[in-house]
Image (tube, rainbow, N blue to C red):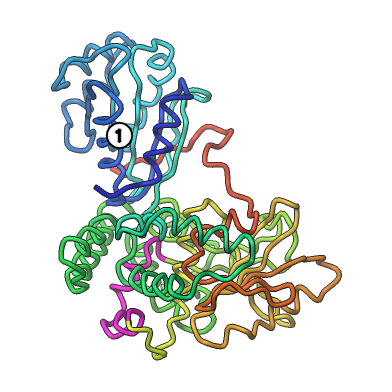
């Protein structure tokens, strides 16, 4: 069984919250499996209703006239007794019938059972719920497995990971043997990624990367199918954005050229196509900022952005096999900068760090930049090659007295090394960067009513 961070979040929710839980995320990232295993461990019994597979249950629950009627109808589809105080009600694929969420307030107030709702956000459009139960739902967004979770899966001891974290915080070198081994694990993760099916294929086949690639190619095909099925009138445009993503990352400076999806395309007309993929959990949109000042959101320039794929392994499967070979074998050719950046975007997103990059004609470009807890910003450069001691753009920002930046970070194949006011960290340490650098994470539970995403009919 793959250990996931969402499990501890669910345990914390069970012990400290009286709200229902809503877990969202893209398809095939392990939501249902993680919730199911949590239910088996933490409850005497649980009831699972999949609103995508069980249309009869969906219709019955949507037409319930009251909370008691809802529970009565639910019991008709339960495969076990519902024990008050020790039963979890798990309603999966809730995006198929989001108005079921209107009943949550009364279910929570009733208090006999605990409730988890889960939704796959791929292939969706915005649609408001008639009466979202503000104050009665805790929301968590689940992502593909990050590098730390991958390390758990391949048997890396948590004590080793904690040592790495402390070395990064203390700015002290990691043992060279550990560093070399973790760099090999990092390169493996570049190829395998964090989709549970791909990780299981890697583990069950004793490291057969061709088996992993077949799984990833199937997942990419599923995503294309879902785009075609659910994107409605924008199917062709959304599909073209998805198809262009790998090439756009490697061409030029990596900035997405909107005209790549059609010579008449414009950001103002196609913005929803990019938002669609981002909200669906398929792509990670990284906006450009022209000034390194907090809060970065205020200075974001929406028409200028990069678009990464949500899972680096799935992205790798869309490049030639030789690219995966080069990454795994640490070959200097071809240039793997886009893959390394995609990994960084995935790791920052897993830590709920909003994605921005900095670009200035005079000062150059910094791959990522993040708000810090001391109301400043942190420039972050990702280096795939061996010339990681050169970082002109970060140096220019740090030297500018107007910005008053204290430190920059370069992640590369280097061990932990403090170089003036630039901290070099190994690429595999990106999983703990938010903690090490004091970055500001987004609130996973917004104050405003959640905007449910629903299938287009």
Find disc 1 in the rendering and name its residue.
38
Q: Is residue 172 left or right of residue 74?
A: right
- Establish if 372 lies above or below 108: below
Front residue of this view, candidates 252 and 417: 417
Residue 198, percent across and down? 24, 61
Q: Is residue 105 left or right of residue 119?
A: right
Residue furthest out toward the right? 401
Asked whether residue 262 is in view, the answer is no
Quadrant of res 249: bottom left
Asked whether residue 289 is in view, the answer is yes
- Establish if 12 lies above or below 392: above
Q: Is residue 313 magenta?
A: yes
Front residue of this view, candidates 8 and 69: 8
Report the residue at 45% width, 23% height from top.
Answer: 19
Report the residue at 53% width, 65% height from top.
Answer: 267
Q: Residues within 10 Å of mark 1 (few under 14, many from 20)?
A: some
Report the residue at 42% width, 61% height from top.
Answer: 283
Quadrant of res 392: bottom right
Front residue of this view, candidates 352 and 451: 352
Residue 106, percent across and down? 41, 14
Report the residue at 21% width, 67% height from top.
Answer: 212
Secondary element under disc 1, as helix, strand or loop, is helix
Q: Main secondary structure of the magenta part?
A: helix
Residue 199, percent across and down? 26, 60
Q: Is residue 20 magenta?
A: no
In the rendered image, the quadrant that contains the C terminus is: top left
- Establish if 5 lies above or below 384: above
Q: Is residue 49 left or right of residue 143?
A: left
How many labels were placed on the picture? 1
Q: Which residues are magenta?
A: 309-328
């Amino acid at each position: 069984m793959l250990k996931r961070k969402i499990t501890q979040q669910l345990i914390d929710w069970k012990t400290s919250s009286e709200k229902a839980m809503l877990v969202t995320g893209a398809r095939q990232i392990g939501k249902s499996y993680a919730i199911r295993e949590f239910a088996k461990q933490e409850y005497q019994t649980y009831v699972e209703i999949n609103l995508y597979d069980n249309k009869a249950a969906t219709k019955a629950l949507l037409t319930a006239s009251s909370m008691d009627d809802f529970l009565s109808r639910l019991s008709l589809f339960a495969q076990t007794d519902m024990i008050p105080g020790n039963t979890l009600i798990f309603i999966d694929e809730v995006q198929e019938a989001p108005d079921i969420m209107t009943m949550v307030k009364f279910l929570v107030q009733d208090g006999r059972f605990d409730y988890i709702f889960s939704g796959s956000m791929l292939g969706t459009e915005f649609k408001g719920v008639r009466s979202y139960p503000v104050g009665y739902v805790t929301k968590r967004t689940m992502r593909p497995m990050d590098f730390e979770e991958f390390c758990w899966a391949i048997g890396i001891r948590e004590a080793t990971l904690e040592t790495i974290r402390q070395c990064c915080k203390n700015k002290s070198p990691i043992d060279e043997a550990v560093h070399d081994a973790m760099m090999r694990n990092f390169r493996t993760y570049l190829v395998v990624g964090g989709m549970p099916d791909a990780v299981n294929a890697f583990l069950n086949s004793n490291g057969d990367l061709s088996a992993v690639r077949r799984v990833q190619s199937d997942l990419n095909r599923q995503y294309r199918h879902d785009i075609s099925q659910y994107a409605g009138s924008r199917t062709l445009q959304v599909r073209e954005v998805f198809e262009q993503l790998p090439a756009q990352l490697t061409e030029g400076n990596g900035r997405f050229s909107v005209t790549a999806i059609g010579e008449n395309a414009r950001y103002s007309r196609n913005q929803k196509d990019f938002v669609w993929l981002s909200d669906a959990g398929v792509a990670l949109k990284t906006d450009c900022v022209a000034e390194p000042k907090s809060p970065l959101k205020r200075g974001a320039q929406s028409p200028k952005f990069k678009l990464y794929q949500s899972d680096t392994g799935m992205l790798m499967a869309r490049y030639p096999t030789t690219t995966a070979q080069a990454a795994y074998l640490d070959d200097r050719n071809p240039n793997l900068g886009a893959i390394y950046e995609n990994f960084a975007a995935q790791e920052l997103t897993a830590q709920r760090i909003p994605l921005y990059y900095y670009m200035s004609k005079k000062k150059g470009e910094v791959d990522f930049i993040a708000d810090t807890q001391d109301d400043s910003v942190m420039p972050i450069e990702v280096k795939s090659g061996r010339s990681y001691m050169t970082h002109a753009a970060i140096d220019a920002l740090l030297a500018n007295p107007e910005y008053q930046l204290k430190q920059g970070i370069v992640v590369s194949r280097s061990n932990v090394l403090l170089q003036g006011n630039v901290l070099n960290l190994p690429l595999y340490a990106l999983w703990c960067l938010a903690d090490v650098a004091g970055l500001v994470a987004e609130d996973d539970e917004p104050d405003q009513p959640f905007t449910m995403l629903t299938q287009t009919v």
